[in-house]
Amino acid sequence: MQAKQYVEQIQQYLEEKDPNQSEFLQAVEEFLPTIVPFLDEHPEYIEHNILGIIVEPERMIQFRVPWQDDKGNWQVNRGYRVQFNSAIGPYKGGLRFHPSVNMSILKFLGFEQIFKNSLTGLPIGGGKGGSDFDPKGKSDPEIMRFCQSFMTELSKHIGPNLDVPAGDIGVGGREIGYLFGQYKRLREYDAGVLTGKPLGFNGSLGRTEATGYGAVYFVKHLLEDKGDSFQDKKVLVSGSGNVAIYAIEKVQELGGTAVTCSDSNGYVYDKDGIDLDLLKDIKEVRRERLTEYVKERSNAEYFEGSVWDLETAADIALPCATQNEIDKAKAERLAANGVKVVAEGANMPSTMDAVKVYHENGVLYGPGKAANAGGVAVSALEMSQNSQRLSWTKEEVDGKLDDIMKNIYETCRDTAAKYSEKDNYAAGANIAGFAKVADAMIAQGLV
Ligand code: GLU
């Protein structure tokens, strides 16, 4: 069978089987066409029906999470873990706590994670989990009770050689601490069961910064390759979680000016460059909304709505908030405003139409599975340190992260040039990420 026909058949099958899983269908639809040129050269993957197998998670777990709020009322949420692919290592990927979480979102994230983790070059499979629990406005004890209940069930399904969750939206050091404590109470002290742990108990230096720094390193290597740098570049950033905060930090360190950040209500435009100390204080310490930022920084402006509706000339865009934040019109605006590089700190922040706009306008596009792989890469380094019962220095971890991001960029570039079109890093990322996993699956007897 022809590769093109084969991938269309898989897509059609999924659309019939899971018509309501729009985010998962989107992730698969972005992926499949880009690997056609590779499949044309390697019919053995078609003969093994690798795609038909790879789009089915190895295992999906869904459970109830009952917990008591501060008023004494009993609440319930849904908990999930999608164990998507273990061909090259234990399932690895974050937990997301957000009201939008459902099976479609977790399958899209888990699917992306397989290839992202493969691209890091480290031995980690793909998984993702979470809950529709909304941490916003909850007290610390409520978060703790929820995490304990969530882990009471999840603990039966994870382990350092089986499945190693970490953070994602709504899950940071505080939540990982509570989850770890409950795992310990139920099983044993096993540092390698979760990553993104606080530094005091087996966390890795540099993990908090890794996703944001990694995205900026990806762009740094891309720019260097084109004889350019971050110096004096104007950078638009969305989000104000740890990905956005540390992307902004690294941009400023490399001589660029990051002028925006956002939350789910609106965004800040600070033309002199985001004041990082203030942003960190508001988000990491006080856990407040971005409206606070402009109260304390008179030159900055706050607008409701999407940061991608801002009309301003810029050089680089780093979407670091959430899926589908940039649609066709917003991508057209970015291109019209002079943006030359888009690198995704978030997972799938650009719709398929937006990606088309980037390609049509010569905007260099670093897809999430490549550009934001630094987070999970340092999670894998945390696993190594836990196994060794050692802690590496911040410089050591950061140096490895920079090397990994350079390698990912070069792999995307070279694979795109070989099988697809020059500078189509999305195709490069998909093909390179896929090839390693597919070979391992075949070698293991397609299990
Ligand atoms: N949630 C992050 C991601 O999307 C990190 C996962 C991890 O560290 O395991 O890659």
Image (cartoon, rainbow, N blue to C red):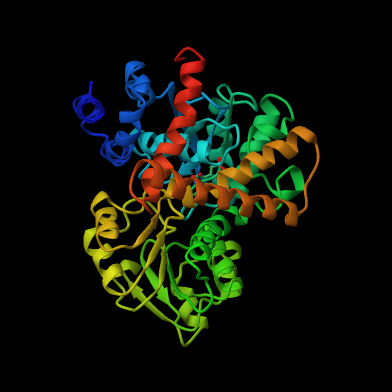
In which quadrant is the N terminus drawn?
A: top left
Viewer-nearest residue: 394 or 2: 2
Going by the image, does 370 lie left or right of 198? left
Q: Is residue 171 visible?
A: no
Residue 264 locus on image (x, y percent): 38, 61
How many marks can you see? 0
Viewer-nearest residue: 33 or 322: 33
Residue visible at 24% across and 66% down?
Answer: 332
Residue visible at 23% across and 53% down?
Answer: 353
Looking at this view, name the residue that lies furthest to the right: 390
Looking at this view, name the residue that lies furthest to the top: 445
Residue 37 locus on image (x, y percent): 31, 36
Residue 255 locus on image (x, y percent): 57, 76
Q: Is residue 40 above or below residue 421?
A: above
Residue 371 locus on image (x, y percent): 48, 52
Q: Is residue 381 above or below residue 268?
A: above
Q: Is residue 210 visible?
A: yes
Going by the image, does 200 lie left or right of 370? right
Q: Quadrant of residue 165?
A: top right
Q: Is residue 399 above or below residue 189?
A: below
Going by the image, does 418 lie left or right of 186? left
Viewer-nearest residue: 375 or 335: 335
Viewer-nearest residue: 403 or 24: 403
